[in-house]
Amino acid sequence: MIDNKYDFVVLFSVKNANPNGDPLNGNRPRINHEGIGEVSDVCIKRKIRNRMMQLGSDVLIQSDDNKVDEYKSIKDRIENTIDKNILKDKVKFSEQVNKTWIDVRTFGQVFAFKGDDMSVGVRGPVSIHSAFSIDPINITSIQITKSVNSTGDSSKKSSDTMGMKHRVDFGLYKFAGSINPQLASKTGFSDEDVEVVKKSLIELFEDDASSARPDGSMEVINVYWWKHNNQTGQYSSAKVHNSLKVYRKDQDIEAKDVNDYVIELSNLEGLECNVIEGK
């Protein structure tokens, strides 16, 4: 159990990368109807989970690219880790999955498998918002080809396979989150877990490279971290998150770097903000 509420905001930049492709739009970077770039909360949680694993914590929801055990599914991982005698006991099951996996006691999880009578929902204390760019983003799309044969004996040159690759030229993104002590008491989320979450945010894009996100193309600028002096919070999360304002210095010039922005942090009496530079 933790004794304090926490709020945080993460500011990160994207340069010549696709931070979160939209499968319903040809995997182009996600944007809203105003052209503002978006990175979904699910995508951010995936990166946090990956960092948690790299920091040595046990994680239930593992992606195929970052899997660290031999289990082929979530159900397989649960059935081979949790005591089979409690699989039908909702209370004991909840206690055990929270104790075993940090991402369950952090974000929560719904456990419902086809053919099973038991369904268990765990509500986690850490909430993460989607990230949005400060300004509308420019998306560059390029056509790519493949110059080798995927099939056949290579005696005949096949037609080059055509495809598209998309990237954000530059974007400064921001997302917020909170840690709720009341829910932490239900899952066993501890002060040690708070530090794991904080470190994961600071190092969010470490070892996250891909062809769509080359090394160095995504960077955490700062993590803004508020620790309230009680469990309910000295201010609402909305007021805390909105105390950070980011806007372009010159509205007539396209931003190409974080230095083209002004970052203003308003003072909230009695609540200090710890500004941590990204790794």
Image (cartoon, helix red, strand yellow):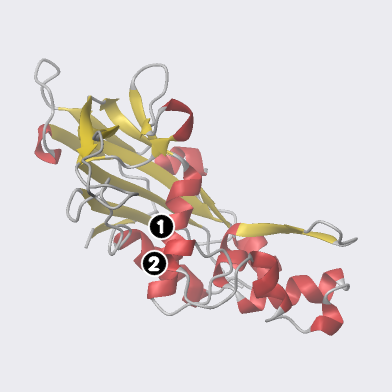
Q: Position of residue 161 (x, y in %)?
A: 28, 35
Which residue is identified by label 1? 47
Among all residues in the image, which is located at the extreme right?
117
Which residue is identified by label 2? 51
Name which quarter of the figure residue 256 lies in: top left
Among all residues in the image, which is located at the extreme front?
155
State the SS at label 1. helix
Q: Position of residue 150 (x, y in %)?
A: 32, 49
Amino acid type of the residue tagged 1 in the rendering: Lys
Reply above or below: 265 against 181: above
Amino acid type of the residue tagged 2 in the rendering: Arg
State the SS at label 2. helix
Residue 123 visible in image: no
Q: Residue at x 50, y 52 (%)?
A: 178
> Residue 71 or 102: which is nearer the viewer?
71
Q: Residue at x 45, y 48 (%)?
A: 43
